[in-house]
Image: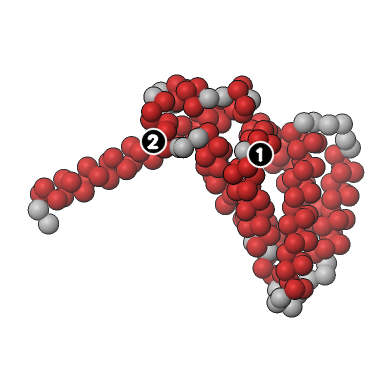
Amino acid sequence: MTEASTASRAGGSLREAQKRLTRERLVDAAFEAFRDRGYAAVTAAHIASAAGASRATFYLHFPSKAEVVIALLERIEPTVVAFHRSLDESDPSLESVREWLDRAVAWWERDRLRFEAFEQALAIEPKVAARWFESVHRAADAMPRHLAAFTEGPDRDRERLRLVTLITQLERLMYFTAVRQAPHDREQLVDVLAEQWWDVLKQS
C-alpha cells in the first residue's frame, strides 16, 4: 500500500468520523429543541443553529426533521427490544411481570420529555408513526420463547398480534399517565397491567 493510498484512507476515515459526529450533534440538538419548543414549532434552522451548523448542513444529513425523530427512535430501539427480551428470557410469574412493568413505568416517568417529543411527531408525521410501529413489532419479535409455545402459522401470528396489542396499549397508557401526568394511582395501575400481561404470558 502506497503512502498516498494510506493517507487517502486515513482522510476518508476522518471525514466519516466527522460526519457521524455532526449527525449526532444535530440529533442531540433536535431533541433539546423539541423538548423546549415542541415538535411543531421547531424548524431545521433551529436545529442547525443549536448544533452549531448551517441549515445546508442539516439537509446534508436529514431530508426533514421527521428523519431526526426516526434517528432518535433508532437510538432507543435496541434498549426497548432488549427490555422485552429480558421478560421473555425470565421465568415469568405474576410477581416478576409486575416488577418488569414497574421498571417500564419508571423508565417512561424518568424519560417523559423524550417520549413527549416522539408523541408530538407521531401525531403529524406518517413516516414517524410507521417507524414507531415497526419498533413495536420488533419488541414483540424479541419474545421468541413465548411465541414458540404456539403452532407456527395462524396461531403464532395471532399471538404475535396479541403482544403487539399489549405493547401498544402500554405505550398509549404511558403517554397519558407518565408523559401527560394524568391523575392515577400508580400502584393500582401497575397491578392491573401485570394482571393483563400475565393472562397472556402464562399461556406459554
Asked whether 195 or 182 is in front, the reply is: 182
Q: Residue at label 1?
A: 122
Q: Residue at x 87, y 31 (%)?
A: 183
> Disc 2 or 1, which lies upstream in sequence?
2
Please give left or right for residue 2 compared with residue 75 in the image: left
Q: What percent of the width, then of the height, locates residue 16?
A: 32, 43
Pick out the residue farthest to the bottom.
151
- Say which amino acid is labelled 2: Leu
Q: Is residue 36 visible?
A: no
Q: Is residue 167 visible?
A: yes
Q: Residue at x 38, y 40 (%)?
A: 20
Asked whether 18 or 194 is in front, the reply is: 18
| Mark 2: few/some/many CA within 10 Å (<14, 14-19, 20+) | few
Quarter of the rendering containing residue 84: bottom right
Please give left or right for residue 31 compared with residue 26 in the image: right
Quarter of the rendering containing residue 48: top left
Does 152 sit above or below residue 17? below
Q: Residue at x 72, y 69 (%)?
A: 157
Please give left or right for residue 138 compared with residue 147 in the image: left
- Say which amino acid is labelled 1: Leu
Q: Which disc is residue 166 wearing?
A: none
| Mark 1: few/some/many CA within 10 Å (<14, 14-19, 20+) | some
Q: What percent of the width, then of the height, locates residue 123?
A: 69, 36
Q: Residue at x 38, y 28 (%)?
A: 56
**Secondary structure of the residue carrying numbered label 1:** helix
Q: What percent of the width, then of the height, locates residue 134?
A: 62, 53
Asked whether 122 or 141 is in front, the reply is: 122
Q: Residue at label 2?
A: 60
Q: Quadrant of the image for the N terminus?
A: bottom left
